[in-house]
Amino acid sequence: MLKNGVIRGTGILVVLTVILLGGCGEYEKLLKSRDIQLKYEKGVAYYEAGEYVRAATLFDQIANIYRGTIRADTVKFYQAQSYYGQRDYMMAGHYFSELSTTYPSSAFLEEADFMTAYCYYKLSPRPELDQEYTHKAITAMQMFMVKYPGSDRLEECRQIITEMSDKLVEKSYISARLYYDLGYYKSAILALRNSLIQYPDTKYREELMFLILKSSYLLADNSVPGKQRERFQAAVDEYFSFIGEFPDGPYAKEAQRIYETANEFLANNNNES
């Protein structure tokens, strides 16, 4: 019984192998063929079947040949979509953008403009990394909204812009916080201030303001005697800025301790120049 089952299974495997090899051989012949129409039709068929690598390869072969014809933008659109199907957002975005630039009267124009922006969105990395594509996504989405004020994708654009803007806020916070975590308090104060200037309504505002206060205090506490009085006074000034805005927040008690310590130093050294 087991032997027959093994033989039957082996037979099925052989049949499948033959079919696959036959398919591969047919595809290899297609790649070498000069029948452009056939390549186009097979490219569309592969795309619709979800075989995006094969589809993209075929459209890559014929895109320039169809350039200048009435089907040129369609080929370009399928080419871009085939790369998008592979999650190759860089190449997909490039071809969507190329379609928009080269064929401004195309029926695919609105879709191509949106997908160009959407590919930037998909390329946007986590907040810790460089945010070039995040900026590009925001700009491209904003341009799409201006260009197509009646589009049914405006709400999606707004949501993406909000998401990308939040990521930039988080990136700014992480970068500024890093100087504090490393103990570079002078640089931390500058970076934290810049983050607040750039994003005054950030959800991290209270924490950033507290870190400016604490960095000012730690900078003073670790300074040479000749600079301590001036820097402790700066810490006191930061305390009043912070507590005036967040008198009852989670950092209020620690802020009060910093203020009392800094004020005590100033009181004990009030005769120093």
Image (spheres, rainbow, N blue to C red):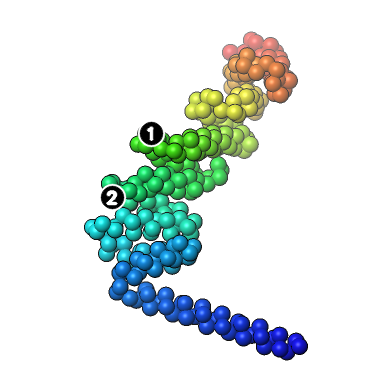
Residue 188 locus on image (x, y percent): 57, 31
Q: Nearer the viewer, residue 176 or 114?
A: 114
Q: Secondary structure at mark 1?
A: loop
Determine the residue positioned at 31% across, 55% down. Answer: 73
Q: Identify the disc placed on residue 149.
A: 1
Residue 79 locus on image (x, y percent): 38, 59
What quarter of the picture does the N terminus occupy?
Answer: bottom right
Residue 149 locus on image (x, y percent): 38, 33
In the rendered structure, which disc, 1 or 2, sits on the residue that comes first in sequence? 2
Three-letter residue code for mark 2: Tyr
Going by the image, does 176 lie left or right of 47?
Answer: right
Q: Residues within 10 Å of mark 1 (few under 14, many from 20)?
A: few
Which residue is tagged 2?
103
- Residue 58 visible in the displayed image: no
Determine the residue positioned at 39% across, 35% down. Answer: 150
The answer to whether the residue labelled 1 contacts the one labelled 2, judged by CB atoms less than 8 Å apart, is no
Q: Secondary structure at mark 2?
A: loop
Position of 238 relative to 15 (above/below): above
Report the Cα–Cα distance between label 1 and label 2.
Answer: 20 Å
| Residue found farthest to the right | 1
